[in-house]
Amino acid sequence: MTDVTTETEGVNLPEATLRMMSIAQRSMAVAAKMQALSVAKANGSEYSLMDASTLAKAYTNVWTRMLTKPQELWAAQLQMGTSMAQAWTAMLMPPSGDAEPVRDRRFANAEWSEDPVSRAYRDAFLVLEKSISDLLDTMTEEGRDDMRVNFYTRQAVSALSPANYLATNASARTKLLETGGNSLLDGLENMLDDLERGDGRLDIATNDAHAFEVGVDLATTEGEVIFENELMQLIQYHPRTEKQNKIPMLFVPAWINKFYIMDMQPKNSLIRYALEQGHSVFVISWANPTKAHADLDFGDYMKLGPLTALDVIRDITGEEKANVLGFCIGGILVTAMLGYLAAKGDDRINAATTLATMVDFKDVGEIGVFIDEERLEILRAHMEEKGYLESHHLQDMFSMLRENDLIWSFYEANYLQGNKPRAFDLLYWNSDSTRLPKAMLLWYLKEVYLENKLRQPGGLEMDGQKIDVSKVETPVFVLATIDDHIAPWTSIYPATGLFGGEVEFVLGGSGHIAGVINPPNERMKYGYRTGEAYPAEAQAFLNASEQHKGSWWPHWTEWLAQHDGELVPARKPKTRGKYKSIEPAPGRYVTARPAD
């Protein structure tokens, strides 16, 4: 411990002692908040992603079925015992230079192999983890209960990793000794910071919250807010070329997070890139919903969002047609809007682009463990008074889909090692999430997620129009990413057979965010795949597809150029008239925080 002392009430105390006293005081206040939160969850007044009764039912059903297969269960247990015995035998031997390296990022540090205690716990844990995974692969079937058992068992096993405990984590123990115990105090203070910010909920910091400021470091492309209503602001960006494509472009972002995922820093801004390719770009910046937005449904998002924006863009540019791009749920809105316009005989969309946008919700991946009819009713009751779902629930859900990367890696770094999170623009954006209004969320989860009506001809109805995407003859560029854990690419690929017109399908590398925000640069990250034909099965496309290096962005702009070749003098936002500048981009809607 440090020898530095501080005088308090006439007594000189070591600085470490003062820190521990402060930690103890803060811990008492946080403990009260944690207890209140636990009580609220127990009595149902606080929404929880999963309740104990639903989980107990799932485990009971799966375990009961397992017992009807005693031979398979015994064989799996025997294999687990054999593997564990082999692991313990290997632990008694000195480490060998010929041993196969452990390819697991949780145990990448060399100390996991050099320290015999940590090596023993690591090897035993990896055997246990694989054995349980193999058992569940053998004994579980398709269905929501089995998926829940697989998912929550994995959550429990991941939590047991020796990387998550000071006593078994060699590098954390080493740092504890090297710092004279200060790394432990740093970690405790980091945890208290997160608990205080979450008001009793552990809101694990994944980035330096002070490293960026929207409008200063992020979302810096020059533009003007030229229209706003209760649901969105419309931004028109300053041109970055002397001439622009005649047909303007509207970006429709997701409203689960904020629009500036498409305008991060200049080096990775999709908006800036589109401007530099000569496009006239307009972007919707969604409002962060409050109770006043509670009754706005999915159709209201379409009417007050892209349909209104398209009217404004037509008035400003004089062009009857526009290109439109939608990301994630914004892409689902764009897809439904295309069906809506087709039903009305309105051909105002010249070409459409969807990014990470599911059209078939038959297999939504692990997100399905959080959504069913029963959970929908619990969610409805929770939102009845507030009128919205708080942002942290979705953050927690998405983090649990990649728990080792988005939860436990930061748990180790922040709390066991006592480090502060580094600055990372994508994770800063990820933590800057928004609320979701009651009517929109309930309609979307029931009609689209649970009943999969988007792909059913006439399945959805919006503003009195039956939606049939097979009637859409607009050319559509569809991007999926191969490791997307939120919108599985196999649930995006069916778009190739659903739309009635030309479809260009591209399969990018990486996941939901990094695969989309993959700018052209010298690093040539991830790459993408294209195909000459779109067979019915996604795997058949993957087998026949061609791999390309680098970013998919140039491929997209080349595709757009085939549908929009005429140029006009660059359009600058006006300073006078009906659609003059209200305020500079990125506008005030995007800076609204969940607590506002």
Image (tube, grey):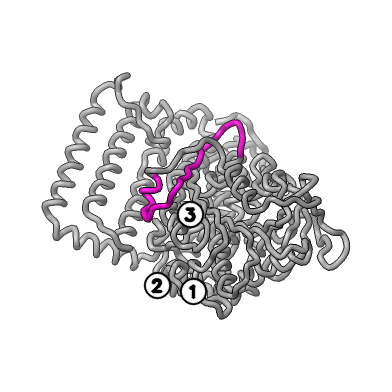
Magenta residues span: 520-542
Evaluate whether residue 17 shows in this view.
no
Give, as a three-letter code, the residue at label 3.
Phe
Residue 402, image x, y percentages: 44, 48
Q: Which of marks 1 and 3 is in front?
A: 1
Magenta highlight: main SS: loop
How many marks the image carries: the answer is: 3
Asked whether the beta carbons under mark 1 and mark 3 sit within 8 Å of each other, the answer is no
The circle on residue 220 is none
Q: Which of marks 2 and 1 is in front?
A: 1
Q: Is residue 127 magenta?
A: no
The circle on residue 460 is 1
Q: Is residue 368 left or right of residue 577?
A: left
User: Pointer 2: what residue?
Assistant: 373
User: Pointer 3: what residue?
Assistant: 398
Disc with the residue nearer the chain's start (2 vs 1): 2
Tell me the quadrant of the picture where the C terminus can be found: bottom right
Residue 214, image x, y percentages: 70, 50
Q: Residue furthest top?
A: 97
Give, as a three-letter code, the residue at label 1.
Leu
* Helix, strand or loop status at disc 2: helix
